[in-house]
Amino acid sequence: MALLDDRVALITGGTSGIGRAAALAFSREGAKVVIAGRDAGRGEEVAHEVTAAGGRVVFVRADMSRPEDVEWLVSRAVETYGRLDCAFNNAATEGEPKATADFTGDEFDEIVAVNLKAVWLCMKHELRQMLGQQPSGGSIVNTSSVNGLGGVAHGALYAATKAGVLALTKSAAQEYGPHGIRVNALVAGGFRTPMLERVFERSSGGDSEAAAAAEGQISQMVPLKRIGRPEEAAEAAVWLCSEAASYVTGHSMIVDGGLTAWAR
């Protein structure tokens, strides 16, 4: 029996990277999947991949920073499949690397809107649906980052939002545990995603050799000596949403190849 047999799973940021890998992994484990993202072309490509692999999937174009989009997205998932059992709130933006005092107010608002407020908006509607459906209950996983555990130079706003995701997660876990809803965080290290590729490109000024050197430097900091595969993050999210993790809530699952092991 598959881990998520006949469950309904909503995945935001599902058009690339960890979200794309999660769409395929959740589907493989038997879930009926709804993926959401802003890029319709990439979303349809991922939906086609899931369908080609034998899965059931719907792509919904939505901007997670827009309250009306989020409310409509959750409604669409329920209209399509009848309920909502799992949610993987994974959409995020990294922003431009800058010193803390150099960010503008607009940049602050944008990063907070996408990385933190959007997670709260998703949880707001997901939790209400999970409370009201019969049978009630469900599992939510929010993507955070190791940068949210202790901050990062030239990425203060990203780090702050990812720290906020952890606080939201732990608060909701305490509030909704009695109602059969588990809420956990995936604390991601470095994974080979378009976001990480952009970070390497920016840090190297577009020089491919410098970007490769930066990647090698990061890899040497990881005890497993490599950048993670998106599929490895997706498997953690699948497990947290499954009954195999039925006694796990309010947990920050660090998946980083041991990068932060020295500081935990």
Image (cartoon, rainbow, N blue to C red):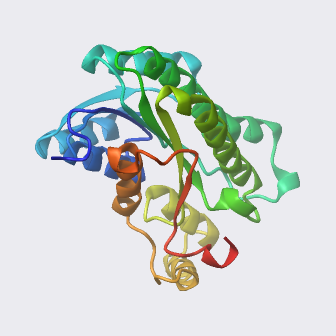
| Position of 13 relative to 150 (above/below) | above
Left or right of 93 on screen, residue 226: left
Q: Which residue is drawn at 55% across and 66% down?
A: 201
Q: Which of 252 and 218 is in front in this view?
A: 252
Instruction: Find residue 86 and report its horizontal and vertical position in percent.
Output: 38, 34
Q: In this view, does 14 lie to the left or right of 51?
A: right
Q: Which quadrant of the view contains residue 167?
A: top right
Q: Give the image location of residue 10, x and y in percent.
A: 37, 33
**Dividing the image into 4 quarters, which one contains the C terminus?**
bottom right
Q: Where is residue 101 in the image (x, y as percent from the top left)?
A: 88, 53
Of 211 and 246, the residue lying toward us: 246
Tell me: residue 15, above or below residue 146: above
Q: As drawn, is 48 to the left or to the right of 217?
A: left
Note whether 7 is above or below 263 in the view shown. above
Q: In this view, does 41 lie to the left or right of 70?
A: left
Image coordinates of residue 228 in percent, x first then y, are 43, 69
Q: Which of 243 and 51 is in front in this view?
A: 243
Residue located 30% across and 44% down the image: 23
Q: Residue at x 45, y 73 (%)?
A: 227
The residue at the far right in this view is 101
Q: Looking at the image, how many numbered discs can be counted on the residues?
A: 0
